[in-house]
Image (cartoon, rainbow, N blue to C red):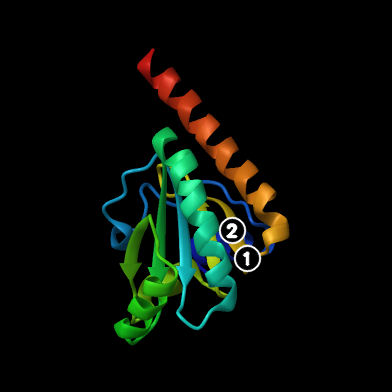
Amino acid sequence: MTLKGFLLAAVALFGVVGAVRAAPPAALAPVEGRVVWVDFWASWCVPCRRSFPWLNTIHRKYGPAGLQIIAVNLDKDRSLADKFLAEVPAEFALRFDPAGALAKEFEVQAMPSSFLLDADGNVLESHFGFRTADMAEYEKGIEAALAKSQSQAKEAAR
């Protein structure tokens, strides 16, 4: 197993990992946030219909503080994604990965699968599935990542 494979397996098991990348994957570009929430979804995913309104709220609340949300659709047929989006609009960035290359890189295991990344692309947290009962926990992780990012930015400015 490669180091990258080991670290991604650690993310799957423990949800937290140290430095893995020097930057977020190029397929996510442009990445504008200091902290990035990457959400893999599909049109047939029932929990995704519940996660999108929450993601819209989080985007409005934390976007100005440096959070970028990128939702990556895995449908092979783009029209299915477009139909979903007409019913459940997204106020955040979208990417389309019909071949599943980016999903393979993140070793996506469930729909939705979400990854909280720092500015260097390191995975801070991973979540498989979406549970409304866990929304406060997800938000705490985002707040902690943003606080750390802001602290590092202040240090760098000195």
**The N terminus sits in image quarter:** bottom right
**Which quarter of the picture shows residue 101?**
bottom left
Across and down, in percent, residue 34 comes to: 40, 39
Residue at the spot 34% in from the left edge and 63% down from the top edge: 94
Is residue 117 in view from this perspective? no
Vertical side of 63 occupied by 111: above or below:
below
Point out the residue furthest to the front here.
Answer: 87
Vertical side of 1 occupied by 35: above or below:
above
Spatial distance from mark 2 to mark 1, Cα to Cα? 11 Å
Across and down, in percent, residue 140 comes to: 64, 42
Across and down, in percent, residue 23 comes to: 35, 48
Say if mark 2 contacts mark 1, CB within 8 Å: no
**Which quarter of the picture shows residue 63?**
top left
Across and down, in percent, residue 68 comes to: 40, 47
Secondary structure of the residue carrying tag 1 is loop
Q: Which mark is residue 130?
A: 1
Front position in the image: 24 or 147: 147
Vertical side of 10 occupied by 121: above or below:
above
Is residue 28 in view from this perspective? yes
The residue that label 2 is drawn on is 126
Front position in the image: 26 or 44: 44
User: Which kind of residue does numbered mark 2 sit on?
Assistant: Ser
Residue at the spot 52% in from the left edge and 51% down from the top edge: 116
